[in-house]
Amino acid sequence: LHYPLRRQRQMCIRDRIGVLLPLTGNMKVYGNGFMDGIEMAVSDINKKGGIRGVPVTLEVQDSFGTPNLAVFGFKRLDEMGIPVIIGDASSTNTLKVAPLAEEAGVVLISPGSTAPGLSGYTNYVFRTISSDTYQGRGIAKVLVSLYPEAENVSVVYVENDYGRALASSFTVAFEEKGRRVCQEIGFDEGTSDYEYIGRLLKERDPDAVVLISYSLDAAEIMNAAKLQGVSDKAWVGSEGLIDEELIEGTGDYSEGMVATMQANRIISDSFIERYMEEYNRSAVDWTVPYGYDTMMMVAEVIDAKGYDPEAISGGLKEIRYIGICGAKSFDDNGDIY
């Protein structure tokens, strides 16, 4: 199939927005958070009459957190004639789908994919969170500021596009500050050999550990380190560790751990109160407002430009949006400043 030719033969659906997120699987906590925010935005849009007088509906595909199913979900939505898709949550999945979106002429806008490699897709691919180039520098800055005595640091990272890029960005920034990364440990997501990682950390005895992972693996790694007697270490993590599951899985061992993220502070108290009431939650995860703002940006552009993918892409490149998480606009690569 040649996507551009098929696109010419099929009219775009005028009332539907595609969603491609991991609603089950090991990344479901992120996918469901984004989904909550998207649904809240759709509710607000439809209460005001929809887009151009037509209520918005969502066509949702579960990527299960895996690249192959993300591709399958994207193709399903493309075959329906959906002009714009919100997703995916992970960098690995979005990088797999991005070339298909460019070829098909379908707008793909991710609320959570941070790999620098996405900057190479400049026509139809966007993201509402910035590149890991910036977060790596941020982790280095935070670590040096909070733990000036930490001269030698171990980096433990998940072996995928997200983990490798963020680990590399951190290492460059940290060593530019005159510090040393004494150990780099990559691991496969869902690995069973966490004990080995714990032993490596014990042998090298770093001043601090930078952990770039998702919460379930991170809890296993920290527990393995604890069993090996790795103590009195500063632990600094990426945004994937900002999750109650990590606290529940590690107990007192994670007390004092610091994790960084690029997300802006929520600037609406009423949004926080509404979410906690509607979803019976005691806090608002960062994914919720990012899902909300992403959906609202898409709706604003469609309302101004129409449902044609080319028009949506052009509109996103022009937009200056003020949302729940502050101001957002895109550079020439489809990246948020």
Image (cartoon, rainbow, N blue to C red):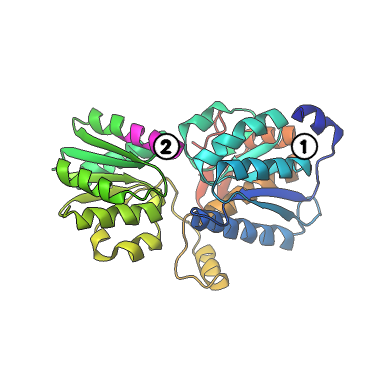
- Where does the image place residue 224, in percent across and percent down from the top left? 26, 54
Left or right: 63 as drawn, with respect to 169: right
Secondary structure that dominates the magenta span: helix
Pointer 2 or 1: first along the chain: 2
On residue 308, the disc is: 1
Instruction: Find numbered disc 2 in the image and state the secondary structure of the residue it sits on.
Output: helix
Name which quarter of the figure residue 209 lies in: top left
Label 1 is placed on what type of residue?
Asp
- Where does the image place residue 240, in percent across and percent down from the top left? 41, 50
Please tell me which residue is depicted at 23% across the width and 36% down the height of the picture. Answer: 183
Q: Which of pointers 2 and 1 indicates the residue nearer the eye?
A: 2
- Where does the image place residue 121, in percent across and percent down from the top left? 58, 28
Report the front residue among 202 and 285: 202
Please tell me which residue is depicted at 53% across the width and 34% down the height of the picture. Answer: 335
Whether 30 is drawn above or below 203: the answer is below
Label 2 is placed on what type of residue?
Asp
Where is mark 2, residue-wise?
A: 132
| Region rendered in magenta | 161-170
Left or right: 62 as drawn, with respect to 30: right
Does the image show residue 193?
A: yes
Please tell me which residue is depicted at 32% across the width and 35% down the height of the picture. Answer: 170
Instruction: Indicate yes or no whether the magenta region holds residue 168.
Output: yes
Does the image show residue 205?
A: no
Name which quarter of the figure residue 304 lies in: top right
Please tell me which residue is depicted at 30% across the width and 42% down the height of the picture. Answer: 156
